[in-house]
Image: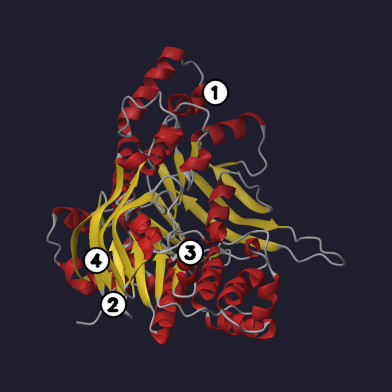
Amino acid sequence: MRQPLLDIQGLRVTAAGGRIVAVDGISFHVEAGEILAVVGESGSGKTATGRAVIGLLPPGLTCSGGAIRFRGEDLLAASSSRIREFRGAEIGMVFQEPMVSLNPAMTIGAQMEEGMALHTALSRAEIRAACIAMLKRVQIRDPEQCLAAYPHEFSGGMRQRIMLASVMMLKPALLIADEPTTALDTLSQREILDLMVGLARDEGTAVLLITHNLGLVARYADRAIVMQRGRIVEEGEARSLLASPQQAYTQALVDALPRRLPRIRRQSEGTPVLEARALEVQYGGRQRLFRRTPGVKAVNGVDLAIYPGETVALVGGSGSGKTTLGRAMLRLVEPTGGQLLFRGEDITRAKGEAYRRFRLACQIVFQDPYSSLDPRQRIGSIVMEPLRHEPGISQAEKRERVLKTFEDVGLPGFEDRFPHQLSGGQRQRVAIARAIVRHPALVVADEPVSALDMTVQKQILTLFRRLQQERGFACLFVSHDLAAVEEVADRVIVMQQGKLVEEGDRDGIFDCPRHPYTRALLEAAPRLEAIA
């Protein structure tokens, strides 16, 4: 039999002297040119497995057993210098967050040239030419200017393209892609995966794709393994495994995928809770040495009304202006033009009591709850904070309302914990609790589930939907996750380059999109139904 490119046998990854097991004796292999997906929730051990292959486990984790054979050589028995020979040249890795994995103090050119200089005998001019050629292959418009730029000057999708170009320049035999598209919109996600798979096919590179997105597995993988608590619970041909999962855990993952549910509200009635009329937000240009760069109109003449009790989903690609619009609707970003009306009252430039009423009645759930929750406060104090300005309510009544809110979001008895003691899903529940404790008229949810795995995402969406039905608040749901939008939205607004290009009820938008940009977004979204 032909020897597999990567052969893992009985791998164990442990911490705390073996008392904590992250990977518990797993075995699998990857053939040359194959795309193998490793699927599982956060904490399942899939990232630890990928990092163990190239010897990049974080401090505290160690490989305590088993073998990792690459082309027949056991990497666990190899010296550090030998591992460095494999790393980059033979085994490449694309990390989840390119802004973290790219050095912010080095130009793109310096970072791309580093690996080539280390692993090849090419001259500096040849390396630069290879960098430019690879940047062109990943569709960077001005590759020469890109080499002189820094990572912060690019969007998330562009940074991931650059990271992919850096890794694939050395033509590795194995590419480990650890959640390479988690925070990207559907268009960028598809572009990055298509590029990655295309480059891998061209070079004969095998791919170990680590992901919790089952749609990507169905679209791109040849085989898949499912991990739970450090163990492999199921494996097989990717499409067959997802179409007919045999194990309860795999079935639970598939069942957690968002699905279209009956709409909460059928029509828009009465006075809008919040309305934008020809709203504009323009950011000023940057002063260069001899000139000033032109400003950017992030929101360009938007008309949007949100009615009591309904969920309006705001969708679009990265840079479309949807997050800026959501924040401008709450005046967290001050509009530079147009009007904002709260329950029919113009609050565009309001101050004093009118502005206070508006801000107390409208709340926001941020994308990353870990950075939006004060790490020094207990979560009971965090959730109680919005009640400071609630008139005519005693301290005892405030505490009672906080405890009731914790029960409503499924965290009874958690009020004395700190944010770092909670999981990502639990922190998002705290963020929701803080937003609803005042019984607001409107909640803006800015990408509330984009960084969560499928089962936790399902729990948060179900919770949000139930709370909205019980409390009757309106919601502006800002998201690039079209599957989540399809589950919760009553109406859908599509943004492109700061403008609204299409709007309508959810079923009409998803079943009969009219604008080419809307169709492109829907076609790019990976859907599990395609494997049926």
CB within 8 Å, label 1 to label 2: no
**In the image, which disc is placed on residue 389?**
1
- Residue at image position (49%, 71%) is 85
Position of residue 408 relative to residue 329, above or below, is: above
Q: Residues within 10 Å of mark 3 (few under 14, many from 20)?
A: many
Could you tell me if the residues under marks 4 and 2 are in contact, i.e. CB atoms within 8 Å? no
- Seen in the image, is 201 located left or right of residue 127? left
Please state which of the two labelled residues, at mark 4 or mark 3, is closer to the viewer.
4
| Three-letter code for the amino acid on which mark 3 is drawn | Gly
Residue that numbered label 2 is attached to: 31
Q: Which residue is mark 3?
A: 316
Q: Is residue 50 visible?
A: yes
Of the numbered discs 1 and 4, the one sitting upstream in the chain is 4
For numbered disc 4, what is the local secondary structure?
Answer: strand
Measured as percent of width and height from the top left, residue 382 is found at 48, 28
Mark sitting earlier along the chain (4/3): 4
Q: Position of residue 173 (x, y in %)?
A: 40, 78
286 and 401: which one is in front?
Answer: 286
Q: Amino acid at mark 4?
A: Phe
CA distance for labels 1 and 3:
35 Å
Instruction: Sort mark 2 into few (<14), some (14-19) or many (20+) by Cα contacts within 10 Å.
Output: some
Q: Say which residue label 4 marks.
A: 28
Of the numbered discs 1 and 2, the one sitting upstream in the chain is 2
Q: Are marks 4 and 3 in contact (CB under 8 Å)?
A: no
Left or right: residue 526 compared with residue 346: left
Is label 3 in a helix, a strand or a loop? loop
Give the Cα separation between the discs numbered 1 and 4: 58 Å
Q: Residue at x 27, y 51 (%)?
A: 230
